[in-house]
């Protein structure tokens, strides 16, 4: 199944947000909580919340960053 190319930016932003926020959640829970009972649940909660926050932010700021970079970098 392929998604229409007009949704490329949204799909890219959502995947980028998930690929960044999930590993960050893992290491932050590991650092602050450690490997002990309840780690997996704490990680899942943190990963879900982090992804829920980062997806809308990524959809706003990735296109903005792309426009800024296009304005300041020569072709």
Image (cartoon, helix red, strand yellow):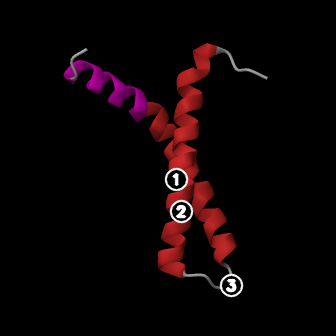
The reply, left or right, for residue 53 in relation to residue 62 is right
The reply, left or right, for residue 24 in relation to residue 40 is left
SS class, disc 3 = loop
Q: Main secondary structure of the magenta part?
A: helix
Q: What whole-number distance in Å separates the C-alpha atoms at marks 1 and 2?
A: 6 Å
* Mark identifier at residue 21: 1
Give the magenta-colored segment's residue range: 61-72
Picture quarter containing residue 8? top right
**Mark 2 = which residue?**
25
Label 3 crowd (10 A; few <14 / some 14-19 / many >=20): few
The reply, left or right, for residue 65 in relation to residue 43 is left
Residue drawn at point x = 51 percent, y = 38 percent: 56
* Mark identifier at residue 37: 3
Q: What whole-number distance in Å separates the C-alpha atoms at marks 1 and 3?
A: 22 Å
Above or below for 35 versus 42: below
Q: Is residue 63 magenta?
A: yes
Q: What whole-number distance in Å separates the C-alpha atoms at marks 2 and 3?
A: 17 Å
Where the C terminus falls, by quadrant?
top left
Q: Is residue 3 magenta?
A: no
Counting from the top left corner in percent of width and height, residue 37 is at 68, 84
In this view, the residue in front, 30 or 41, is: 30
């Amino acid at each position: 199944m392929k998604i229409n190319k007009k949704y490329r930016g949204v799909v890219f932003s959502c995947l980028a947000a998930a690929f960044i926020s999930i590993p960050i959640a893992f290491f932050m829970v590991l650092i602050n909580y450690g490997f002990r009972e309840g780690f997996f649940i704490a990680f899942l909660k943190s990963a879900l919340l982090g992804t829920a926050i980062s997806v809308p932010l990524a959809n706003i700021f990735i296109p903005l960053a792309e426009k800024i970079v296009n304005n300041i970098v020569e072709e």
